[in-house]
Image: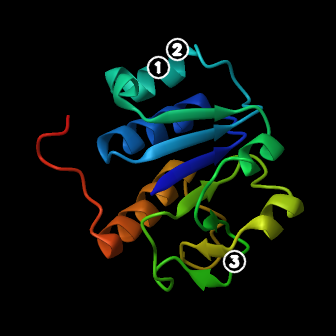
Amino acid sequence: MRLALYQPDIPQNAGAMMRLAACLHVALDLIEPAGFVHSNRHLRRAGMDYLDDLDFTRHDSWDAYLQAPRGRLILLTTKADLSYLEPTYRRDDTLLVGRESAGVPPAVHDTADIRVRVPMAPGLRSLNVALAAAMVLGEAMRQTQQFPTRGHR
């Protein structure tokens, strides 16, 4: 299981998702360009010392990311009709989240094998991207029984 961040703009959210990935022992891909420098203090603060335990890969662009081997690409988007609770997840899936300010462009949206959304109360626009990622990742890991062992930090 992997978590991919498409051109994140908010370092605190990226840091929170990096910490999430490290704690759950899930690999994380960051697809550039990000809206901040990687030494940003907000990123480091949100990720704390967990970032040293993160299986982390930076990709210079979307095209560079597509060259990396991967399983299915599952996009978390408010534009999906399918609830994140409906698919059967696989251990080699990558969960992709978009930019906080704009999501992903149509070409990226169309590349996804599956598009899912987190159902919300009517009239509300979206959850924080890190919260949505945690919800979907939790369900995917529950289905695949892919939890870290007690011995992992």
Furthest residue to the left?
A: 150
Task: Please give the label number shown on residue 80.
Answer: 3
- Could you tell me which residue is drawn at 11 percent across and 46 percent down? 150
Q: Name the residue under label 1.
A: 44
Q: How far apart are marks 3 and 1 (CA)?
A: 32 Å
Query: Which quadrant would the N terminus be assigned to in this image?
Result: bottom left
- Determine the secondary structure under disc 2: helix
Q: Check disc 1 and give the amino acid type.
A: Arg
Labels 3 & 1 near each other (Cβ < 8 A): no
Q: How far apart are marks 1 and 2 (CA)?
A: 5 Å
- Could you tell me which residue is drawn at 47 percent across and 19 percent down? 44
Q: How many labels does the image show?
A: 3
Question: Residue 104: which quarter of the image?
Answer: bottom right
Q: Check disc 3 and give the amino acid type.
A: Ala
- Determine the secondary structure under disc 1: helix
Labels 1 & 2 near each other (Cβ < 8 A): yes
Viewer-closest of 142 and 17: 142
- Could you tell me which residue is drawn at 39 percent across and 36 percent down? 19
Residue 109 against residue 20 in the figure, above or below: below
